[in-house]
Amino acid sequence: MNLANKLTIFRIILVPIMMLIPIIDNICGISGEFLGISTSFWIMNVIFIIASITDKLDGYIARSRNQVTTFGKFLDPLADKILVLSALIILVEYGKIPSWIPIIVLAREFIVSGYRLLAVEKGGKVIAASIWGKLKTVTQMVGIICAFVDKFKFGDFIFRVATPEKAQIYSASIYMTSGQFIVNILSTVILTLAVIATIFSGINYLKDGKDLFKD
């Protein structure tokens, strides 16, 4: 097995380790915080960042060393899906993001996976990744990294502080003291862009693969 595939497998192994952190936190309690964020979130974020780096690294190594394999082509996108969806589920569990975000991501992956299987069955047509697909991956990963270190919930600053009747409850000064308003805006905006890119990349697959339904 080449180095690129080993990195991909390592990324998959990191996922259950990341998923164990909330369980350990619930059972034993992981004490401490840094910059107002629980230690458990920092641990999960570090694991996620390492896994995200291996995503870029394994592809670079495979191409530069001419180690692109069929196994790698199958496993690499699968590892990405497992990593992103697992992180989104954790964020939903902690109430940091709404459940419709991973639902949209999961629905898109089901549609695209179905299209790929249909393409293989009908002659092995390859639907190339679009700019939307690349934007989807980047925004999902960056948005998740921001959400892990966001002290507040998705859209708190934009949708609640900006609302007059809730301005006193979600006072801007709360965010200003720790700079968390910037993190909250970043995570909200980037995850919103990720959802848009996810939807458009799915539509792009539907458009490029429309000939698959012509019998």
Image (tube, rainbow, N blue to C red):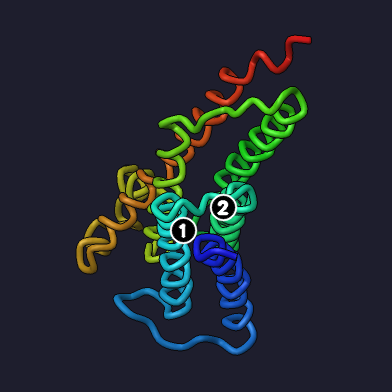
Q: Quadrant of residue 35?
A: bottom left
What numbered label is drawn on residue 58? Answer: 1
For badge 1, the amino acid type reads: Asp
Q: Residues within 10 Å of mark 1 (few under 14, many from 20)?
A: many
- Identify the residue at horizontal 60%, vertical 29% (top origin): 126
For this orientation, the residue located farthest to the top is: 215
Q: Residues within 10 Å of mark 2 (few under 14, many from 20)?
A: many
Residue 41 appearing in the image:
yes
Q: Considering only vertical position in the picture, is 198 above or below 173? A: above
Please tell me whether residue 117 is drawn above or below residue 190 in the rendered image. above
Can residue 153 be seen in the rendering of this structure? no
**What element does badge 1 sit on?**
helix
Cα distance between the residues tagged 1 and 2: 8 Å
- Which SS class for mark 2? helix
Q: Amino acid at mark 2?
A: Asp
Q: Are marks 1 and 2 in contact (CB under 8 Å)?
A: yes
Residue placed at 37% from the left, 74% from the top? 37
Q: Which residue is mark 2?
A: 76
